[in-house]
Image (cartoon, rainbow, N blue to C red):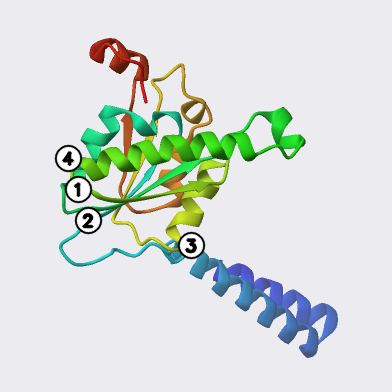
């Protein structure tokens, strides 16, 4: 590579004189230096906006839509954080395409809020310090928005089982794990199975 650099400078000197040779040398030298830097410098992620919460309390960010009231999710939150955890539950206000285009989002947000309230109440009954908020209909954007104000130690994403989950079909877990370096847990909640097991309708 160095030999090619001097060859190019020599040709420039023959064809255009010392000024051209100097210009070619500087341009190639800068390009070579930049290439070496990009090759050896590790890729740096965008600075994490979630930083660890610190202290003895684990801070868990939970993202779930229809599965937010599932017993499996509640058990996983207790397992990972215990009663001493600080939990923020985010429920994206998923909307139909028709309602999205007609800006009729009130019903979607109302339904999301009702599920969220039931989930937070169940966690509170189990002794967990939990708060909730309705997020963007895009789950990745909902995560991004939440992490700007809640410095989570861990992210828990809850979905329906494979074959029934739009989030799994859209590869949400892979994208989230590539975007964030904090630990990300996946919880599968089968509401139909839970309903059958309990003998009552899901909340």
Q: Quadrant of the N terminus?
A: bottom right
Which residue: 65% across, 29% down? 96
Asked whether the residues under the numbered discs 1 and 2 touch, taking CB atoms below 8 Å apart as contact, a structural biologist would say yes
Determine the CA span between mark 1 and mark 3.
40 Å
The residue pinned by badge 4 equals: 79
Distance from Cα at disc 1 to Cα at disc 2: 6 Å
Element at badge 1? helix
Confirm or deny contact between disc 1 and disc 4 (CB under 8 A).
yes
**Callouts 1 and 3 close, C-beta under 8 Å:** no
Residue 64 appearing in the image: no
Provide the secondary structure element on which disc 3 rests. Answer: helix
Contact between marks 4 and 3 (CB within 8 A): the answer is: no
Return the residue at label 3. Answer: 39
For marks 3 and 2, give the CA distance. 38 Å
| Mark 4 crowd level (few <14, some 14–19, many ≥20, 10 Å Cα) | few
Front position in the image: 57 or 39: 57
- Quarter of the image where the C terminus is located: top left
Report, in whole angstroms, how far the alpha carbon at label 4 lies from the one at label 3.
43 Å
Find residue 99 and report its horizontal and vertical position in percent. 70, 32
The numbered mark, 2 or 4, whose residue comes first in the sequence reads 2
Circle nearer the N terminus (3, 2): 3
Residue at the far right: name it: 16
Element type at mark 2: loop
Q: Residue at x 29, y 63 (%)?
A: 52
Which x, y percent locates residue 85?
A: 21, 53
Q: Which of the two discs, 4 and 3, labels the residue nearer the N terminus?
A: 3
Which residue is under mark 1?
A: 81
- Residue 58: numbered disc: 2
Instruction: Residue 53: name its quadrant.
Output: bottom left
Q: Which mark is residue 25?
A: none
Badge 1 or badge 3: first in the primary sequence: 3
């Amino acid at each position: 590579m160095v030999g090619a650099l001097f060859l190019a400078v020599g040709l420039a000197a023959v064809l255009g004189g010392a000024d051209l040779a100097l210009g070619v040398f500087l341009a190639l030298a800068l390009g070579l230096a930049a290439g070496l830097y990009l090759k050896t410098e590790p890729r740096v992620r965008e600075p994490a906006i979630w930083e660890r919460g610190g202290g003895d309390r684990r801070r868990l960010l939970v993202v779930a839509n229809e599965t937010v009231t599932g017993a499996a999710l509640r058990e996983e939150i207790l397992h990972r954080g215990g009663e001493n955890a600080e939990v923020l539950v985010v429920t994206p206000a998923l909307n139909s395409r028709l309602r999205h285009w007609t800006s009729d989002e009130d019903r979607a947000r109302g339904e999301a809020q009702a599920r969220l309230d039931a989930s937070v109440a169940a966690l509170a009954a189990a002794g967990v310090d939990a708060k909730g908020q309705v997020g963007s209909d895009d789950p990745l954007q909902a995560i991004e928005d939440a992490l700007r104000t809640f410095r989570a130690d861990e992210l828990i994403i809850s979905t329906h089982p494979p074959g029934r989950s739009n989030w799994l079909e859209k590869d949400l877990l892979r994208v989230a794990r590539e975007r964030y370096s904090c630990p990300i847990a996946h919880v599968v909640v089968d509401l139909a199975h839970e309903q059958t097991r309990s003998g009552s309708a899901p909340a």
